[in-house]
Image (spheres, rainbow, N blue to C red):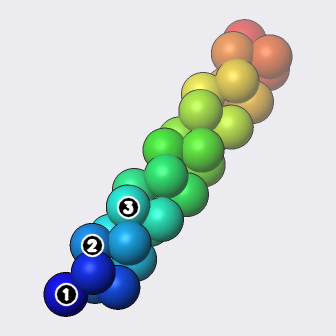
Amino acid sequence: MCSKILLKLIIIHLSGSLMTLANTGTCRYQ
C-alpha cells in the first residue's frame, strides 16, 4: 500500500518535471 502511494507520487513528480522542462523549452524557442 505505502509503496504504491510512493510510486504514484514519484511518477507525478517526474511527469511534472518533464512538463516544466517541455514548457521552458517551448518558451525558449518562441
Residue 4, image x, y percentages: 28, 83
> What's the residue at 27%, 73% (across, down)?
5
Residue 21, image x, y percentages: 68, 37
Select label 1 or label 3 by which is in front.
1
Describe residue 13's horizontal placement relative to residue 24 as left or right: left
Q: Amino acid at mark 2?
A: Ile
> What's the residue at 69%, 15% (across, down)?
27
> What's the residue at 59%, 33% (across, down)?
20
Residue 7, relative to residue 19: is it above or below? below
The residues tagged by marks 3 and 2 sit, at their Cα atoms, a distance apart of 6 Å
| Circle 1 crowding by C-alpha within 10 Å: few under 14, some 14–19, many from 20 | few
Residue 6, image x, y percentages: 38, 72
> Which of these two is toward me, 1 or 28?
1
Q: Which image quadrant: the C terminus?
A: top right
Q: Which residue is mark 3?
A: 9
The residues tagged by marks 1 and 3 sit, at their Cα atoms, a distance apart of 13 Å
Q: Which residue is mark 2?
A: 5
Describe residue 7's horizontal placement relative to residue 23 as left or right: left
State if disc 3 and disc 1 touch (CB < 8 Å): no
State if disc 1 and disc 2 touch (CB < 8 Å): yes
> Which of these two is toward me, 27 or 19?
19
State if disc 2 and disc 3 touch (CB < 8 Å): yes
| Circle 3 crowding by C-alpha within 10 Å: few under 14, some 14–19, many from 20 | few
Residue at the outermost left position = 1
Residue 19, image x, y percentages: 53, 41
Q: Earlier in the sequence, mark 1 or mark 3?
A: 1
Q: Tag on residue 1?
A: 1
Residue 1, relative to residue 28: is it above or below? below
Q: Amino acid at mark 3?
A: Leu
In the structure shown, which secondary structural element does the residue marked by tag 1 occupy? loop
The residues tagged by marks 2 and 1 sit, at their Cα atoms, a distance apart of 7 Å
Q: Which image quadrant: the N terminus?
A: bottom left
